[in-house]
Every structure is written in C-alpha cells, then in structure tokens.
Image (spheres, rainbow, N blue to C red):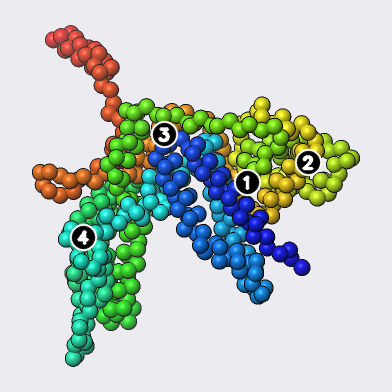
Amino acid sequence: MPAAFNAADHARKCLQLYRSLLRACSYLPDSVARNHIHRHIVYRFRNYNSRAKVLVAVAAQSRSWNERKDAEETLQTRLGKAQASLRTLEKANAGGLLSLQYVLRWAYGRVGKRRFELLKPLLEPDTTPGNGSITTRPALSEPPQKRGYDLAIVPISDIFTPPKVSREHIVYDISPKYSKLRAIILAQVNLGKLLPHSERVLRSYLLKIPTKNEWNRPMPLVRVKNFANKHYAWLLEKVLPPLPDKDWLWLYELATGTRKWEGVPKRRKRVVVQHPEKYSARDLESILHVGRVQSLSPSEQSTRSQYSTDDVEKVLGRLPQSLHHFDSKDTWLEDSQLFEQSKSNVLEEELNVGGQFAVTRNSSDDPHTITERYMKRQLKAILVECPRLSKDKQTGGWEVTSGIFASKEAPDTSTLAPLFDMMELGTSARESVAR
C-alpha cells in the first residue's frame, strides 16, 4: 500500500525550492537577467499557489484513489520542472555555455514568456479599434440569399490585407495598418541566413494559397481560413520582437565593450558548523564525490546495500561539474556519521523526486570561468537576434536597427596607413625605374 501524501513535507520542499531558485537567480552574471527571472519566479509561485492548495487538499483528503494519484502526479511533475529550472540556473552560474545562453535569451525576450510580452505592441494597429488590438473581419449580419464563393466573408485576422486572387494563387499580405510588425518582418526577411538560429529565418512572409484543391475545384473557404490561421501562428513563432531602447542600449554597450561589465555577483558566505539543512548543488557534489572515492568500512555496508554506485553516478549526472568540490566550510564532511546521514538523505530525495527528470550531460554545457571576454561573446550572440525599432523623423515610418550589424565593431584602419604609404612609395619607385 503506497504511503499517504504528506502535505507538510510537500510544503517544506516547495518553500526550499522557492528560496533556492531566488538565491540562484541572484548570482546570474547579468543584471537584466537577474531582475526579469526574479520577477518571473515570484509570479509563477504566487500565481500557482491557489491551484496547488486545491491539489494538495485532493491528494491528502480525497476518498477516490484515482483523484489522489492524479493530484500527486501533478504536484510531482511541477516540483520536478522547478528542480530542472534550478539546475539550469546553477549551470548558468557555473558558466555552462548552453545554460547561460538559454537564460540570457530568455531574459532578453528571444524565448519564453517575455518574448510574447514584447510581441504585443507589434500586434496593435496604428489606428487601434475600440474592441481590441486584433480584430477579425465581421461576417455578414444576414446570410446572402444565394450562397457564392466570396473570400471577403472568411473570418481571419485583420493583420492580413484583402486577398489578391490570380489564376493559381490566393495571396495575403501584411496589412499596412500594422506598420511596426511589417517593418520588423521585412527587415528579418532581408537578413535571411545571416541570423544564427535557422528557426528564425524568414524567406517570405506572403501567404500563397492555391486557388484549386486536389479535385480541381475552388479551394473551400474553411481551408482558406485554416491556412491563414496557421500562417499567422507561424509568423508569430518566427518574428524576433524588438527590445525596448533602454535594454537594447544596455545590451549594445556591454556587447561592444562601451560599458564595463559589472562582474559576477559576490556570493554570500554561509556560516555552517554542522551539515546544512538544505543542500545546494555544490553540497551534493561534495557529498557524492566523497562517497565515490572513499572506501566503505564494514559498519557502512548498510548504505552500500541501500544505494549502489550506480545511484551515485545517476545523481552526479544531473549536476554541473564544479571546478572546486570542497572549500573551508566543508569540515562537517569529516564526521562519518553526519556524512552518511547526509548522503542517505540526498540520494533518497534526488532519486525519488527527480528520477524521471534526468538530464543527459552535455560537454558543451561544462562549467567555464565567467570573465568579461566570455560574457562579451555571449551578449554579442544575443545582440545579433535583437532588433531595435525607432521612428524615422524624416519619412515618419519605422526604422529597424539590426543587432547583426550593430554587434560588428568597425575596424581600426589607422594602423594600416603606414602600410598603404609604403605600397604607394614602392609603386612610384617602380614607375620611375621603368621610365
């Protein structure tokens, strides 16, 4: 019979995980990432709190075994995803390339929730209607007496212009009313394959629908509507929204070296005289590395029988490889009794809670010393994907500054001037000899 759900133990784990996430994001090497991820963590925990209370009540008090099982699995899944996010933040703090790039792309709105927040201003027409930013073409108030093939009654997003029909295609374009979105899309199409991520490449933004279907009949209006909706969703997935001027200038100055990097936040020292109540990733590594290299005495055979070396390696595979496993605060590991108790608790918690969320180790995500040069390269890779949208005072339209060209520093040609002078002198000398 499975053990009953312990609501108090679940609340303790959630609180510890919440504090660990906030602590991990406070050590990120970029202030924009620290602020946005901190707000996102607080929002997600507070927003999910009311639903979690209902699930906890169902898991602890429901008479139906299926309801209790579903509620426990949902809570366990949420807890595992939060632990996976914590590992990503810890890997980013350790300098892991993939994790740090993902965190920075999330913070600057290239992926994740902030990207959709930055997309909202682009989806507002120049003359905002009273009923919302995105409207659909209203259907006729009364159906026509004779039903015919009329593309004007297709209920699609107002972001498209009325269709242009030729013999082969029905063509939809981006409406000039959405001038911001149109300017960003045109700039992204012109960049083409210069973008580093192939999933962001836009070769064309026009929607072309065949006028005839497979049976050589006019394309049904329902299929036209479905094609338009899919193309609209595809465009929103491809578009790189512009950053606000404040964030773009901050990113540009850091990536080009105009502004000095603030450095990695200094870690707060933890005063520990005995084993900590909550283990960080470094504590896990310290415990498990000691358990892997030390020889077990006969009195410790119970631990060997309960948790094998494979279990230790399994937990280690989820952790970032640290550059230093031990420091002066790890003197409590010398106490064999405390060590064995801590090791047992760590293995039990990690193997039970995070077993189904095992992360495959990637050599590209190994720790790296975070220096100014290293951060400059990472921020320059982010700047490439960040356009800037500004109003052109002369034409009144929108001007898009691509991060690809802004991230390339102009070469210093002053050092090449003496070389060109010598080449000119050599050419004139050869011409005088020929004469």
Callout 2 amino acid? Glu
Tag 3 or tag 1, which sits nearer the N-term? 1
Q: Are marks 1 and 4 in contact (CB under 8 Å)?
A: no
Q: Nearer the viewer, mark 2 or mark 1?
A: 2
Residue 168, picture quadrant: bottom left
Q: Residue at x 19, y 62 (%)?
A: 128
Label 4 secondary element: loop
Q: Is residue 365 visible?
A: no
As drawn, 90 above or below 371: below
How far is the residue under mark 1 from the one under mark 4? Answer: 47 Å
How far is the residue under mark 1 from the one under mark 3? Answer: 27 Å
Q: Are marks 2 and 4 in contact (CB under 8 Å)?
A: no
Q: Residue at x 25, y 65 (%)?
A: 132
How far is the residue under mark 2 from the one under mark 4? Answer: 64 Å
Tag 3 or tag 2, which sits nearer the N-term? 2
Q: Nearer the viewer, mark 4 or mark 3?
A: 4
**In which quadrant will I find the N terminus?**
bottom right
Q: Which residue is disc 4 drawn over?
A: 125
Q: Position of residue 407 (x, y in %)?
A: 32, 35
Q: Is residue 157 left or right of residue 102?
A: left
Callout 4 amino acid? Pro
Tag 3 or tag 4, which sits nearer the N-term? 4
Tag 4 or tag 2, which sits nearer the N-term? 4
**Residue 110 marker:** none
Label 2 secondary element: helix
Q: Which residue is disc 2 drawn over?
A: 340
Q: Nearer the viewer, mark 2 or mark 3?
A: 2
Q: Which residue is disc 1 drawn over?
A: 318
